[in-house]
Image (cartoon, rainbow, N blue to C red):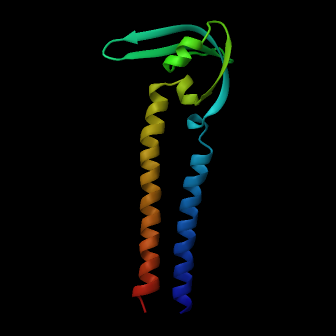
């Protein structure tokens, strides 16, 4: 009985640590978090083909120039040279191939690792609790 409780406690601890690690990594990921950012609109652009895409060319406070996809109403109401506040991620402002690879493949690998460890711990927990005597 004592050995069974110890094994159950270990399984629960592994599950708790895995879930906590996943939550912490997601919580501290500033690259994908939305934040209000003040930008100056420098230009507007529309790309028309089969469907029309509307963009505002903006410069952020740090001097980074980028484009923001906007709706038709926003495109018509935006004035060039004025300051606007958009809810943006760092990924929307500055994006490199290396960052994309790290955040895409790194997330897949990390999530897979956490799910495998958590799933294995859960299965062991169930086996210890219900199957073993």
Q: Is residue 101 in view?
A: yes
Assign the C terminus to one quadrant of the image: bottom left
Q: Which residue lies furthest to the left in this view?
A: 50
Q: Nearer the viewer, residue 36 or 72?
A: 72
In terms of image quadrants, where is residue 10?
Answer: bottom right
Using residue 97 as the reference point, say whether residue 81 is left or right of it. right
Q: Nearer the viewer, residue 47 or 103?
A: 47
In terms of image quadrants, where is residue 13?
Answer: bottom right
Count of numbered circles in the view = 0
| Residue under the image location 56 percent in, 23 percent down | 93
Q: Which of 114 and 39 is in front in this view?
A: 39
Q: Is residue 67 in view?
A: no
Q: Where is residue 22 in the image (x, y as percent from the top left)?
A: 54, 54
In the image, residue 10 sits, relative to residue 32, either above or below, namely: below
| Residue under the image location 53 percent in, 14 percent down | 75
Q: Position of residue 110 (x, y in %)?
A: 47, 50
| Residue under the image location 66 percent in, 25 percent down | 37
Q: Where is residue 79 in the image (x, y as percent from the top left)?
A: 62, 8
| Residue under the image location 58 percent in, 31 percent down | 89
Using residue 46 as the reference point, say whether residue 17 is left or right of it. right
In the image, residue 69 sits, relative to residue 131, either above or below, namely: above
Q: Where is residue 19 in the image (x, y as percent from the top left)?
A: 55, 60
């Amino acid at each position: 009985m004592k050995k069974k409780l110890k094994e159950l406690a270990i399984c629960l601890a592994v599950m708790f640590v895995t879930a906590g690690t996943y939550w912490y990594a997601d919580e501290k990921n500033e690259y994908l978090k939305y934040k209000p950012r003040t930008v100056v609109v420098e230009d507007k652009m529309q790309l028309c083909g089969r469907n029309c895409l509307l963009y505002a060319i903006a410069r952020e406070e740090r001097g980074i120039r980028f484009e923001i996809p906007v709706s038709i109403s926003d495109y018509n109401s935006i004035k060039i040279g004025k300051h606007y506040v958009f809810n943006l991620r760092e990924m929307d402002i500055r994006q490199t191939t290396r960052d994309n690879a790290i955040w895409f493949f790194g997330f897949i690998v990390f999530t897979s690792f956490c799910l495998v460890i958590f799933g294995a711990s859960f299965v062991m927990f169930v086996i210890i609790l219900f199957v073993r005597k």
